[in-house]
Image (cartoon, grey):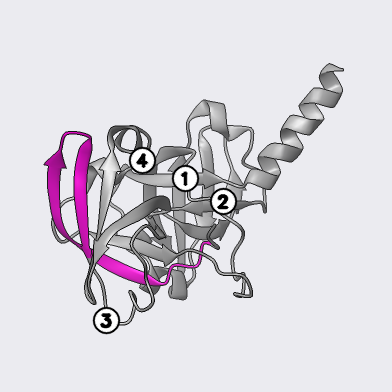
Amino acid sequence: MFTGIVQELGIVNSVLETESGFSLEVKVQKGFSSGLLRGASIAVNGCCLTVTKFDEDCISFDVIKETMRITNLDSLELRDLVNLERSLKFGDEVGGHILSGHVSCTGEAILENQEGETELIIICPSEWRKYIILKGYVAVNGASLTVAKVSQEGFSVFLIPETLSSTNLSLIQKNGLVNIEIDQTTIAAFKAAETRLDG
């Protein structure tokens, strides 16, 4: 489980093709891997990946073909920055909202700056739009954010300076793909309401 508070911007150090997908190595600041264990979970751009090996400044993961199909990890290149969050421990502060690290879908994003505000506009696949609610939670590339606008095509969030400086969202190019994880509580509530109405 994760909280959507990005702890570090990692740098893609290598992407090596394997039979099952590819091996991803990410360079991190010293201290990020302190106490880390092989087999631990880390959210990479919001996608829960398993640590295969590590040292004090590099962490490796296997990315399988299914993950490549449903996330933006397939488009990673050398020197790209990725949002990283280590898994939640009991007793940790939950600064964002509870996330599973299971990406719901990807969406095309546009970053707009005007009148001192930074708006991230995301086109969301139609089958997921019904779960996006105004002022509800959503994770974008693993960052916990609040939905500010809802449209027929998707939704928007506004980014504060702290989010811009501590995540890779400030680097999004027009129509760049972002990972989206819909709040599981919202999905459960929506499905419960649908079941009751159907009944």
**Residue 138, numbered circle:** 2
Classify mark 3: helix, strand or loop.
Answer: loop
Distance between mark 1 and mark 2 Cα atoms = 7 Å
> In the figure, is residue 185 to the left or right of 109?
right
Q: Badge 4: how crowded within 10 Å, few (<14), some, or many (20+)?
A: many
Query: Which sits earlier in the primary sequence, circle 4 or circle 1?
Result: 4
Distance between mark 1 and mark 3 Cα atoms = 29 Å
Instruction: Give the label, 4 or 1, closer to the camera.
Output: 4
Q: Decide: marks 4, 3 in contact (CB < 8 A)?
A: no
Q: Is residue 127 above or below residue 32?
A: above
Query: Which sits earlier in the primary sequence, circle 1 or circle 3?
Result: 3
Q: Is residue 6 above or below residue 101?
A: below
> In the figure, is residue 198 to the left or right of 156?
right
Report which residue position mark 1 lands on.
180
**Residue 64, numbered circle:** none
Query: Which sits earlier in the primary sequence, circle 1 or circle 2?
Result: 2
Classify mark 2: helix, strand or loop.
Answer: strand
**Residue 30, numbered circle:** 3
Instruction: Give the label, 4 or 3, closer to the camera.
Output: 3
Residues 3 and 20: in front is 20
Q: Residue at x 26, y 81 (%)?
A: 30
Instruction: Give the label, 2 or 3, closer to the camera.
Output: 3
Q: Decide: marks 1, 2 in contact (CB < 8 A)?
A: yes
- Extreme-top residue of the structure: 198
Residue 48 on image: x %, y %: 42, 51
Q: Which residues lie in the magenta part?
A: 4-26
